[in-house]
Amino acid sequence: MRLSILSKALRSQDRKKLSPPVLLFSAASRSFSQLSSQYQRSSPSFGIAFDIDGVILLGNSPIGGSDKAIKRLYQDSGNLRIPYIFLTNGGGFPESKRASELSKLLGVNILPSQVVQGHSPFKQLVNRFENEFIVAVGKGEPAAVMSAYGFKNVLSMDEYTSYFDNIDPLAQYKKWTITPATNENSTFKEMAPTICSQRVQAAFIVSDPVDWSRDIQVLCDILRTGGLPGREIGHQPHLYFANDDLEYQATFPSERLGMGAFRIALESIFNRIHPNPLAYTSFGKPSPLVFQNAELVLKKLLSSVYSNSHLINHATPGSHNFKTLYMVGDNPSVDIKGARQAGQPWFSILTRTGVFKGKENHAKYPADLVVDTVEEAIDYILRKESI
C-alpha cells in the first residue's frame, strides 16, 4: 500500500523532474566535452551506480582502493570516460556539497548531478508542499536540503523545538547544547507565537536523526495533534522517510542502526498512543522506483557527455538505452535486492567491504557477482565491456 502511495506521488509530478536540473547537465557537458577517440565513435552501452558507505568510503576514508579505481572511469585529461553515479540512501547535505566532498576525497571532478541521495526524491513533492509549513529531521543540514529543493517554509527539528518551552523533558540532562534560537533574540520573541500556532503540514526525515528521544517525542506531538503540538488529537500530517535502512556500515566494525530502526521505534510508540496506525511513505533503495530514476539520471548524464554527437537523439534527450547497468553495493537487502527487483538491464555486484562480509554469495538476495572490493568490481566491469 505504501509503495502504491509512493508510485502515485511520483507519477503525479512532472516527469522532467525525475532527473537533476538541466543546468547541471549543461555544466556536465562543458566539463566532459573532450572524449577519447574510442568513445567518440560509439557511446557506452553501460553505466554504473555505486553505493557510498561500505563500498566507496568508511566514514570519510576511501576503502577497497576506491580512489584509485574511480580514476579509471576518467580520461587522463580528467574528463569523464564512463557514465556513473553514486546511488546512496545516505544524505543530510545538499547534493552539491556531497559532490564537493566526494571530489576531494577521491581526487576527481564529481558533479552534483552524479549524486543521488535517499532524500533526492523529495524534490518531486515541492509542488505539493512548496509553501506549506514543514519540519525537516536528521543530522547534517536537513532544512538546507529542503530549501535547496524549493521548499519555502521549512524549519529543522532543532529550530522547531527551540520555540516550545519544555517540549523535550530530557533537555536539561543532555550534555550537548543546540540553540538555533533563544529567548534573548528579538526575532525569536516575535516569531515564537507564530511558529507555535502554525500547523505543520508534513514532516520529512531527511537523514538519520541524532536525538532519538526528542525527535520521537516531538514527532508524536506533531503527528497525533494534526501538526499543533500541545493541542487536541487531530488528523495526522504527512510523514516521509528518505530511506528505510535497518542497518548500515560505518567506521565501527559491526553495523549501526539506521533510519529504518528509527522508523520502527517511532511507529511502535505512535501506534501505542494513537487510535490509528502511523501512516508514512518511505523512499530510497530497494524501491524499484529508485532504480528507474537512477537509469534516467544516467541517461541524462550520457546525453550531456554526447551532446555534440550524432549518436544521441537531440529530439529526445535521455532516450539512449543501456545494455547493462551495474549496481555496486555492500548491503544485500538494500542494494542487491533493489537491483534484482528492478530487473533488466541491472546487474548486481556485492562487495565484502561493508554490511556483507560472507565468503559465499548471500543466501536470500544473491548478487550476480561477489567481489572483495570496489576495485575488483571495476576491474570486472571494464574487462567485461572490453575497455
Image (spheres, rainbow, N blue to C red):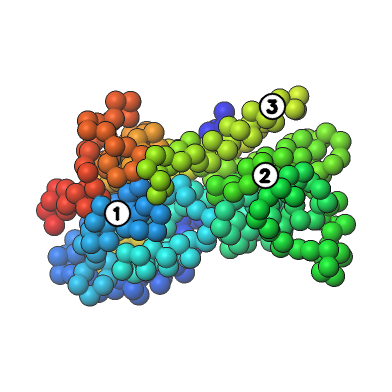
What's the amino acid at mark 3? Answer: Asn
The residue at the point 32 percent across, 49 percent down is 55
Residue 371 appearing in the image: yes
Q: Quadrant of residue 348?
A: top left
- In three-dimensional space, the C-alpha distance between marks 3 and 2, rounded to whole angstroms, equals 16 Å
Question: Which sits in the foreground, 138 or 384?
Answer: 138
Q: Give the x, y percent position of residue 78.
A: 26, 72
Quarter of the image that includes the C terminus: bottom left
The residue at the point 58 percent across, 38 percent down is 262
- Residue designated by label 1: 63
Decide which of tag 3 and tag 2 comes sooner along the chain: 2
Question: Which sits in the foreground, 283 or 17?
Answer: 283
Q: Is 129 displayed left or right of 38 in the figure?
A: right
Q: Is 250 displayed left or right of 329 in the figure?
A: right
- In three-dimensional space, the C-alpha distance between marks 1 and 2, rounded to whole angstroms, equals 33 Å
Q: Which SS class for mark 1?
A: loop
Label at residue 329: none
Label at residue 215: 2
What's the amino acid at mark 1? Answer: Ile
Label at residue 271: 3
Question: Which sits in the foreground, 57 or 46?
Answer: 57
Q: Give the x, y percent position of residue 149.
A: 58, 59
Q: Give the x, y percent position of residue 315.
A: 38, 61
Up-down: is 118 above or below 234?
below
